[in-house]
Image (tube, rainbow, N blue to C red):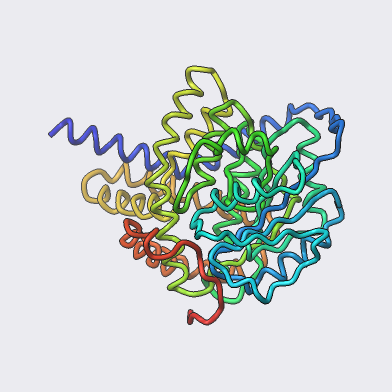
Amino acid sequence: MKIAGNIGLLLQCLIGFNLIFPVVLLLIYNIKQSVKKSLKVTPLPVSPDYAIIVTAYEQTQQLNAVVDSLLKLRYTNYHIYIVADKCDISNLRFPEKSVLLLRPEQTLGSNTRSHFYAIKNFIRPHSHLTIIDSDNLAESNYLDELNVYFNQGFEAVQGVRKAKNLNSTYACLDAARDIYYHFYDGKILFGAGSSATLAGSGMAFTTDLYQKCLGHLDVTGAGFDKVLQDGIVSRGYQIAFAENAVVYDEKTSGTDQLVNQRARWINTWFKYFSLGFRILFKGIVNFNWNQFLFGLVLLRPPLFIFLLLSGFFLIINLFFSPLISVFWFTALCVFVAGFYISLRKSETEPRIYQSLVNIPRFIAFQVLALLKSRKANQISVATKHGHSDKE
């Protein structure tokens, strides 16, 4: 009985740690920034030559918009590669000087397969590559902002994915979630001396590093970014966060869309979270702060899971240990304060604040997604965007 009680207490400590961890990171960030010395920027001897890889699966309706935004980039040393996997490309027309449209004969059904299909068809040996989703729009200074960090010697950079649409309650809540993660898992984590987590698009690497990390693997299903960030940080590299390198991302606007997307993401966490143990252990053995902090972040459960567990432990302890319930309530207040800070420190539209009252409904749909997560990759390979679903 005592052993079971100790195990239960340990579990509570592990879950409770995730509530206060963002604020702890923020404190570390503020301390580091107060003593941080200015970095000397040494431009690369040769300007980066970018391959911009745009992956599409089945859907092409937004490709014209994404290519149009990429053709307006101020930095001009790049070529666009569109990999239209299992797509009808008969009506797609792009300027051949700047865009290579690729339509694999066999269905690839994988982000990384599409990326390496593009790499095999490079018109020249690009020094860098950046990955853009088929529903993204890029700011005109996107590549210039990536160059700021490549010029500092980084070989992997994650930009910011801002909401392209706030047309429903769920799109606003999805955007709030992204702001929270970009703030803590991007800006604050990087500023605290670790690596920004990768977000699947709006990210860039030296071509050599990307091939080194994924060239020997065949990653299928969702989560290639989890494998990629493991490969990068495990090798001792740091992923920079470029908060001004912005791409606009389509937010989930309907419930079916939300559940299917989250089911894949939850499936991905269960599939790859154990990578955090390896990176955490490497960080301890190597006395590597970057790896140690990053490993802790990878072990963190999805937001809604540890919030639900926290609420459960708060209620249970009201009956068995009221004093511990006070600690749970305090930790939840710390988390809420940290979440609010992330919104206040970011460019957050009033609609997003107004949507927060619907968080319980948002969590309920993610619980439904959890129930579907085991077969998530059989439901769909990619999120089907659109605004026809009802709120």
Question: Is 355 placed above or below 97 here?
Answer: below
Question: Is 41 placed above or below 242 here?
Answer: above
55 relative position to 368: left or right? right
Decide which of 5, 282 is in the foreground and name it.
282
Q: Residue furthest left?
A: 1
Where does the image place residue 89, in percent across and percent down from the top left?
63, 71
Where does the image place residue 125, in percent across and percent down from the top left?
75, 41
Where does the image place residue 308, in percent across and percent down from the top left?
36, 55
Q: Quadrant of the N terminus?
A: top left
Residue depicted at 76% across the width and 37% down the height: 150
204 relative position to 388: left or right? right
Mark count: 0
Decide which of 92, 35 is in the foreground and name it.
92
Residue depicted at 71% across the width and 71% down the height: 64
Decide which of 322, 213 is in the foreground and name it.
213
Where does the image place residue 9, in percent across and percent down from the top left?
28, 36
Residue depicted at 46% across the width and 67% down the height: 258
On the question of residue 240 being in view, the answer is: no
234 relative position to 37: left or right? left
Decide which of 131, 118 is in the foreground and name it.
118
Residue depicted at 55% across the width and 71% down the height: 385
On the question of residue 108 being in view, the answer is: yes
